[in-house]
Image (spheres, rainbow, N blue to C red):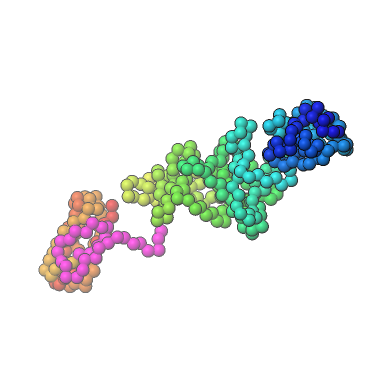
Amino acid sequence: MGIQSLVALGIQSGLLAGRPTTPFVGQTFAASDNGHWYLCLVAGAWIDMGTGGGGGSPGGSNTQLQYNNSSAFGGISGATSDGTNVTFGSGNLRATSPQITTGVNDANGNSMLAFTATGSAVNGFTATNAATGNPAVVSLAATGSSTNVAMNLASKGTGAVGVNASTVLGTYTSTAFVVHATTDKNFWLDNSTKGCRIGVANDAFTTVTSLSLSVTNFYLMNAAGTQALMNFTQAGNQAYASGGILSWSSSATQADTTLDTGIARNTAGVLEVNNGSANTYRDLKVRQHFVDQTITAGGTTGNQTINKAAGTVNFAASATAITVTNSLVTTSSTIYCSVRTNDATATIKNVVPSSGSFVITLSAAATAETSVGFLVIN
């Protein structure tokens, strides 16, 4: 087909110097000064097709891109162009390893998926689809040449990363997917032998080999998700409860009726040991009992102010009574005292509490400086 025939078909023509510098795929140009015609098969690049000679009329329907169909033009039904844009039908654009520079946009041209390239990258994601199953399992896995590849799912600013708790959650292993009822609100990490379950509703325990959380604050919430029962804070590795009870059971199930021991906040600054229900107390067994105390140094005798549950005071020779000012003491306090010095005459006669203090009285005056210890119980 000569150059005149190509021009007659409506193919763009002109002097070679006027040929578009950034052609689109499927665009053609006939140069009137050298008799050659040019075809673009890769965006931005022309192919010199010579002076023709074997051609024919364009194949296919109007706007369809052309391809070499046994030395004749053929139309590509799944690829069309309006002269500016090239449109491929569903499943018609196929590539083994396409190189995407910045990202993928939606139908409105807005960003949907952005890519950030890492120089000399050897690791990435592998997405795997699934055939029919009950349930079917699709996966997104970290893959690459490194032995260990971590996955980071990060939100932006103050945004959070969420899991749709209204859907079914469960445990996935290499051979099975264990489904748990939506009403259980179970959340599982790792597989069935190293699972961690949070917010379980009357279900069997799952073995936790180890669980490491690297967070500033971690909260255990109530069933409604409206109140933090146990809060773990980063500062000083502290843990604190807000109206909740940390409970234990001798049973293998988690039913509330099997709980027999718990620790909870009783009131401001007071911790209680209970049976899993507030204000129903249980025993506490310890190897050694330590109480905050102040030991009054030898040579310091007479009345003292000691705002602690335990301490010592010193009776001077011939003294018979000492008043200890103590903010922990009330008229209902029980106070135990003992003579700590081997004095010939000093013995405890009585200990009388009042609001904010108590008086220790000896049966007889001490013959020398005598130490007396006390313990306050409320």
Residue 288 is left or right of residue 54, and the answer is left
Q: Is-magenta flag for residue 305?
A: yes
Pick the residue in front: 147 or 213.
Answer: 147
Q: Where is residue 174 in the image (x, y as percent from the top left)?
A: 69, 50
**From the viewer's perspective, is residue 191 above or below residue 371?**
above
Magenta segment: 285-313
Splitting the image into 4 quarters, where does residue 343 fall?
bottom left
Q: Which sits in the foreground, 160 or 372?
A: 160
Left/right placement of residue 99 relative to residue 150 reads right
Q: Can residue 25 be seen in this view?
A: no
Residue placed at 32% from the left, 50% from the top? 269
Q: How many labels does the image show?
A: 0
**Residue 5 to residue 290: above or below:** above
Residue 353 in the image, given as x and y percentages of width and height: 20, 54
* Residue found at x 76% / y 28%: 63
What residue is at 59 percent from the left and 42 percent from the top? 114
Q: In this view, does 360 lie above or below 332?
A: below
- Residue at 37%, 47% in the rendered image: 265
**Furthest residue in direction left, as rendered:** 318
Q: Can the viewer see residue 10?
A: yes
Residue 350, percent from left and from top? 19, 59
